[in-house]
Amino acid sequence: MFALPFFRRDLPALKGDRVTLRVPFTNDYREWAVVRGESRAFLEPWE
């Protein structure tokens, strides 16, 4: 199926002074994997 520009919806995002929260995109994975690897020990108690 094809996508027409006038059917496109803007995805929701929460924006603050220093941070923006938005839905993830496929090309975010590599950067996320690096951050997740660096924070693995900190996050393990909550998994």
Image (tube, rainbow, N blue to C red):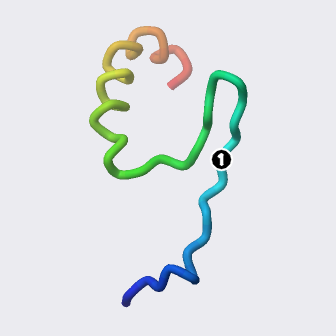
Identified at 27% across, 35% down, the residue is 30
Q: Is residue 41 above or below residue 13?
A: above
Q: Is residue 42 above or below residue 32?
A: above
- Residue with the mark numbered 1: 13
Count the numbered circles shown. Answer: 1
Give the quadrant of the N terminus.
bottom left
Identified at 52% across, 14% down, the residue is 45
State which quadrant residue 35 falls in.
top left
Mark 1 secondary-structure assignment: strand
Identified at 58% across, 44% down, the residue is 22
Q: Residue at the far bottom: name it.
A: 1
The percent coordinates of residue 46 (x first, y second) are 55, 20
In the image shown, does 44 or 26 lie closer to the viewer? 26
From the viewer's perspective, tell me whether residue 36 is left or right of residue 18: left
Identified at 72% across, 30% down, the residue is 16
State which quadrant residue 34 falls in.
top left
The percent coordinates of residue 19 (x first, y second) are 62, 27
Q: Residue at the far top: name it.
A: 42
Q: Is residue 8 above or below residue 2?
A: above
The percent coordinates of residue 31 (x first, y second) are 32, 31
Label 1 packing within 10 angstroms: few (<14), some (14-19), many (20+): few
Three-letter code for the amino acid on which mark 1 is drawn: Ala
The percent coordinates of residue 26 (x first, y second) are 35, 51
In the image shown, does 3 or 46 lie closer to the viewer? 3
State which quadrant residue 37 falls in.
top left
